[in-house]
Image: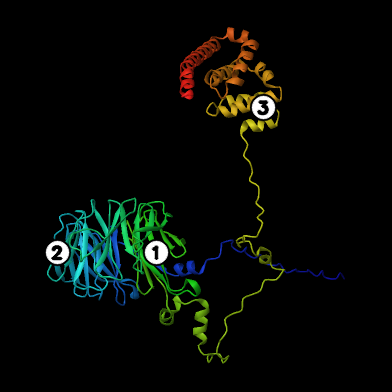
Amino acid sequence: MAEPQMSKTFPVKPKQKAKPRTPKQTAESKYWSSFKTKQIPNLIASINSLTFSPTAPHSFAAAHSTSLTLYNPQNQFSRSSNISLNDVVSSASFRSDGLLIAAADLSGLVQVFDVKTRTPLRRLRSHTRPVRFVKFPLADKLHLVSGGDDAVVKYWDVAGETTICDFLGHKDYVRCGDWSPNDSNMFITGSYDHTVKLWDVRDKDSSSVTEVNHGKPVEDVMFLPSGGLIATAGGDSVKIWDLIGGGKLVYSMESHNKTVTSICVGKVGKLSGEEAQQYRILSVALDGYMKVFDYAKMKVTHSMRFPAPLMSVGFSPDCMTRVIGTSNGIIYAGRRKNKEDVESGSDEELTKYERRLKKLGSGNALGLGPVAEEPRIRVLKPTSFRYFQRGQSEKPSERDYLVMRPKKVKLGEHDKLLKKFRHKEALVSVLGRTKNPENAVAVMEELVSRKKLLKCVSNLDLEELGMLLMFLQRYSTMPRYSRLLMGLTEKVIEMRADDIRASTELRGLMRNIKRAVEEEIRIQQSLQEIQGVISPLLRITGRR
């Protein structure tokens, strides 16, 4: 009886996915990426302005169309109230206590509303054209400043609904402004006349204290937290100026491809080390990019792309919320999670490890005791496929020697034919492309060095000979190529005289070559006559 055959099974090692070759994110990139973005759609028109309340819970107001909408970032950006105006809202600003908000529209009217009741408390009308910005001081509750297309900057007494002073220094539309964080009497304005002016409300003669020229129409300006520096946005650049130094340009950031529309200050408050508690400039532009600029190190530290042109940007005082408005009526609102949010969040918002800890609790569920340590990171072994991919995403240091892979040189058709010693075909291929005479002359010189040019000319058929004569007609009289081509023309006439006489088309080309040569000779003779007249004059001048 035959014994049954035993089948052997061998374990198959599963394939491991290759480790992605993406560079490591810096701590700051992780910080800005931690803002979980949520879209707030259906706002009809472009988001002209975004401003945050200085008091908790730091609601923000979005100016769009004829509405001013307030959102609560702590309640998943729910709409808390809506204020309707008679014309398109261009700008808004909260008072320092967060109880009032001022809104400017394109009818030239500035209105002050109660935030809770949405009641209009004051109507400030003095501008003759659309108002583009309105701003409350950081500490003063009784005044505000506004500017518009009438090129006038107005300083208002809010309680009396009257203008205290008109500042008339700008020559074009006034588009933006900001108050000094250190002095409630000082503010800046930016205009389409390319200038940014510093004003003092105590100076009633309407003359600016300092003026800087941005070089492009100014879209937005702001004071940096120190009070001595300002940032201006216009064109595709954001510039930093030192007001204490007399308006000296400190740096110009030109990383955008289109017009920068809005800037604001953002604070990096949750990092460790040197990057903790530092301020950044956030800029948005029509190219759809948001850039984060570290003006202490003078470099862009983070960048984000959005699918529409960006019109406005805002950052909350508590460093928890970032909002960006687009031209198609969408707000991209991002909020970071703090410890309270994670502890009170639902199971869906927690990570897999956090849900496991929550399920185990203090360890009483299974009697295993409290879980104190996180899972240990698995160490790669030489038997692992990922072991041999270590370091592929590392950046080289200054002392490393880089071995670059040589780039493959793409050869032209004539070069390939020359490498195959197909001389006639190489000559015909370059004659058919008269836009690059340098290539044709280079091929002819190569054939001369190989002693094959005359043989190629003798083997050309009538059509190819016509292409050669047409090339000689165009370029033989050019000084760059005449030394080679004039000699070649003589050889062609000598070798292919019978073919030229027999063809009407070739005889016409020869007549054209003759005219071109005669015209060049006439020009040379005229130049020699002019040289004969000028040379004695130059000698006389040199003797004096």
Neighbour tally class for label 2: few under 14, some 14-19, many 20 plus, Cα within 10 Å: some
Q: Is residue 375 left or right of residue 240?
A: right
State the mark number for residue 163. Answer: 2
Q: How is the model colour-coded?
A: rainbow
Q: Quadrant of residue 390?
A: bottom right
User: On the rendered image, what quadrant is the N terminus found in?
Assistant: bottom right
Q: Quadrant of residue 479?
A: top right
State the mark number for residue 160. Answer: none
Residue located at (29% from left, 54% from top)? 195
Residue 10 image point, x, y percent: 75, 68
| Mark 3 or mark 1, whichever is nearer to me | 1
Q: Is residue 496 left or right of residue 225?
A: right
Q: Secondary structure at mark 3?
A: helix
Q: Earlier in the sequence, mark 2 or mark 3?
A: 2
Q: Amino acid at mark 1?
A: Ile
Between residue 46 and residue 172, name the one nearer to us: 172
Q: Which residue is mark 1?
A: 281
Q: What is the spatial separation of the Cα atoms under label 2 and label 1, in whole angstroms? A: 33 Å
Residue 169 image point, x, y percent: 22, 55
Q: Secondary structure at mark 1?
A: strand
The reply to whether residue 88 is visible in this rendering is no
Residue 484 image point, x, y percent: 61, 21
Q: Is residue 349 above or below residue 252?
A: below
Between residue 248 and residue 414, name the one nearer to us: 248
Q: Which residue is mark 3?
A: 446
Residue located at (44% from left, 60% from top)? 304
